[in-house]
Amino acid sequence: MDPLPLLNLFTKRASQQAKLGGNVWPLNAPTHSPHTLDVTDHFAAAFDTLAAVCETSHRIAMTVTLPPDERMIIALAENRCEVENTVEFLQSLWSALKCLRGNSGSVEKRNDIFVIAYRHGFHRLKQHVSSMWMDAMHFYGFWETSTTKSGDESIHGELRAAFRILSRVFDSLTRTDTSNPVQMVDLVTQIHSLYAHCEVLSNARAILRQWCNDYEQAFNGTARFPLRRYFTGCLALYINIVSLIDVMDKTEFDDMFCRTLRIKAIQPVIVTLDYPLDKSFYESYLDDILDRCEILAAKNSKLWQALEGEITHAIATANEMKSATIHCELRLLSFHQNQRLVSTPEEEVGTETATPPQNYIATSQPPCYACAVFMDAYRSELADVFDRMCTQAQSANPRLQVPWAMPKLGNAEVDRSVQRTVFMMICLDYAKFIGQQFGYRLPRSTQITFKRNWQYNR
């Protein structure tokens, strides 16, 4: 069975219905080890952070290849069709990082990095600040007039200063010309000050939490404002830049900064989704899950009615879902695995090389549920076929981002093996979700039974 209908049409709806936390969905979240034979924790942190700084409105993934010559090759993939702006930005940012290493402690060179990064991420900053601006002002107005707010005048002054600066940032975002160096330096200066005040506020979490509770109680629960989360979102790019500068200063990156950076943009791959619209096709998926997990739906009318509703929803979704873009980290994985199967390049020049990449795919955000499942299947099934690559050390996002499509790894037998394992993993998670919702306890040997009895038919 193809896992994509189960994933795109059934599992997505289940993950939306489930609450995050509480061990509900997925019941067994995929786990990843950041440790590989040739990648350190500093390397993983540095390039995950670099990817995060590069991100604007689309997720980014990248790999690093170090040929025996003087080049460093970054393969870059985004969840959109054009990556030219990101390539230019990455070249500029890397040059600025290299200049800072050559002028350690230079405030001017350090500030250049912030200006370059905020010019690239300007609209991202604007979105974060503006998204909850009215709510922020409503909260601040209540807080300022409150006569019972906790904390001393010192911490009160920090919040007032933070909102005063944030107000100036908000006003400047509408008129700042990102091509104007003076205006960008002024914006970065304001963000520096905002960060300093928020750093003090972060040490008074209990007081901030009490302010938010007082606000919510004053409006009988109809008004809430996540103060810390809002400030963190406004400063997300800043925090990533600080982390990037810090980790890139490690001696293990000396060799990379002595090399010439080459960037290869990997274009998106769009897969056509063509699902049948007849009810029996979707019934076969649920029948398979119920049978393998020993769930007798016929004996539970509520469960059967719920599954009928799932089938109706799946058919309606299939009628609208016609294509999917392969997520950027899986597209990079597919690219590198396919490269290993073709003949070596005629010349080691530009971004062409026979050298395999470092054994890590950096991502700007943790992988989604389906990507994590695929990577687990890939790493468990292909130990003797490929050198296995890892993705972000962070936990996967339990939410599913659909439409989702599966990449090809350049070998039909390998593709079938991974597809089989992905189906089993998703099938088991969906069965556990059903069991949780309707009080079934699945057999302890369910996973073993799957691997022994499941036959690949397509």
Image (spheres, helix red, strand yellow):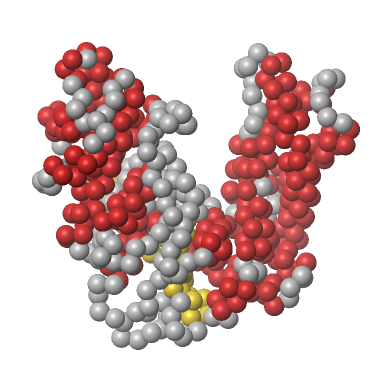
Q: Is residue 168 above or below residue 313?
A: below
Left or right: 433 in relation to 298: right
Tell me the quarter of the image containing the N terminus: top left
In percent of width and height, residue 225 lies at 65, 28
Instruction: Locate residue 399, reporting x and y percent.
Output: 41, 38
Q: Can you give x and y, in whole percent of width and height, for residue 33 in the image? A: 44, 55
Taking depth in this image into account, of 2 and 442 the one nearest to the observer is 442
Q: In screen coordinates, is 276 left or right of 48? A: left
Q: In the displayed structure, would residue 180 be above or below residue 223?
A: below
Determine the residue positioned at 24% across, 48% down. Answer: 421
Q: Is residue 292 above or below residue 188?
A: above
Residue at left offset 23%, top offset 36%? 446
Task: Identify which residue, 266 or 179, lies in the foreground.
Answer: 266
> Disc count in the image?
0
The residue drawn where x is 67% and y is 36% is 228
- Image check: 2 left or right of 354? left
Horizontal side, residue 434 vs residue 104: left or right = left
Q: Which percent across, then down, holds residue 133?
A: 67, 34
Q: Is residue 183 visible from the viewing direction of this image? A: no
* Residue shown at the point (18%, 21%) measured from the top left: 296
Tell which residue pokes out farthest to the right in this image.
Answer: 153
Decide if residue 231 is in sight here: yes
